[in-house]
Amino acid sequence: MNNFEEYCTKFVQSVGAKEGAVSPQIVSSASFSYGDSETGEGIFNGSVKKPLYSRMGNPTTGKLESILAEMDGGIGAVATSSGMGATSLATLSLLEMGDEVISIGGLFGGTYSLFNETLKRFGVSTQFFDVDEIEAIEATITPKTKIIFLESVGNPNMRLPDIKKIADIANNAGVALIVDNTITPLSVAPLKLGADIVVYSTTKIITGNASALGGCAVFRAINEGEDKFKSARYAFMEKFIKKMGAMALIPNAKKRALRDFGMSANAHASYQTMLGLETLPLRLSRITQSVETIAKALDKEGFNINHPYLEKHPHHARYKKDFVNGCGTLLTIDMQTKEKAFAFLNNSKLATITANIGDSRTLALHMASTIYSDFDKETKEFLGITDGLIRVSIGLENPEDIINDFISAAR
Ligand SMILES: *Cc1c(COP(=O)(O)O)cnc(C)c1O
């Protein structure tokens, strides 16, 4: 397990300024005066690089975007009002009526209903697959497939995808691959594995303390020679590639999604997110180690734990090989019945009962009665939501304290 040493240096150095105010400045202005009309014209046509209006970009948010783009090796990033804002921005900027989406793994409840209900209303259809249905995924790609969407870790089913293999399929077919890397920032590098866009809910482990809702989409550079975004499948990209070259996915996302849907980040949230980033490597490396300790100890105590660190998990080998820096803060406990799950949660003195994950504190939630309460039986089965399922997001507490608390809560 790695301590993310590179990022320990990078984040604190890039968030803090070397001159003047050390902490990032919060520019909370919605609008910016151009001074003269020529400058205004230049800002609108892109020849002058100054803020236009905070819906389209804000200096505080811009600083966060450049740090997150560098974190993932992207050419740029667009921060958003929430993680769902980032997923909406990334998908809506590529989709039109009649298009098809392939969604693999997980799936986070909001993302599932975006694909299964909301985008359907706008004439976009989605087919859902488990991470290991590789042949069926390949066979489902048609000329209308615009997006393959993947979660780096199934939330809450804890199944792990072979990201490289799925990226190869997407790249061979010339289809965009979007990876939701919310659960595994730093530990998994989707762009390096062949993805085109990475989306985050920064609300979770990146900010890490429930102080700010936010999201971000990180984009790769368009290649100079051949590139899938230069194909007929993405004909609308042509004008952006002509004007902006390698950067083209950024203006496409800003003009086709941010400008018209307005899922823009606000400066205060961007500031809080940067404060979180400074300690992300430390928190993540501690928690991923705690998760393993806790999963093993509770499994030994007879708890029904789902985590790929455990040898009984079907993706244990993949965890050892491809997830050497862990797979985030989550594990699940199946208490068999709703009653037992409620009793456990109510008895625990450490777990905070909430829908969030990736916090400094240990958080827990009964899945079927909350996030998935209005999902039908088949969907719950597909997503692995059983009657007694509790999702736990391990925090910074002493792992021994958590183990002891959970053992006494289950009695
Ligand atoms: C929380 C979460 C989201 C949505 O993020 P919000 O900031 O709540 O909008 C998306 N994907 C995953 C995996 C999440 O955990």
Image (spheres, rainbow, N blue to C red):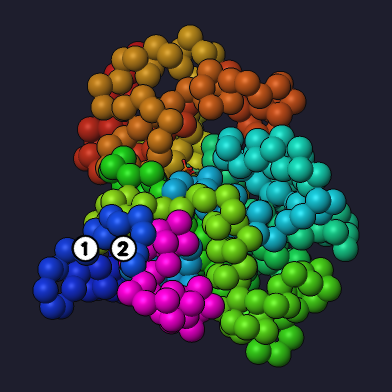
Q: Name the one closer to the observer, 22 or 131.
A: 22
Disc 2 crowd, CA 10 A, few/some/many (<14, 14-19, 20+)? many
Indicate the position of residue 233 as horizontal and vertical percent values.
81, 68
Residue of label 2: 60
Indicate the position of residue 183 as horizontal and vertical percent values.
46, 50
Q: Name the one closer to the observer, 88 or 384.
A: 88
The answer to whether 174 is drawn above or below residue 215 in the figure is below
Q: Which residues are magenta?
A: 34-61
* Marked residue nearer the N-terminal end (1 or 2): 1
Tell me the quarter of the image containing the N terminus: bottom left
Q: Secondary structure at mark 1?
A: loop
* CA distance separating discs 1 and 2: 7 Å
Residue of label 1: 25
Q: Amino acid at mark 2?
A: Thr
In the rendered structure, the answer to whether residue 149 lies left or right of residue 331 reads: right
In the rendered structure, the answer to whether residue 178 lies left or right of residue 356 reads: right
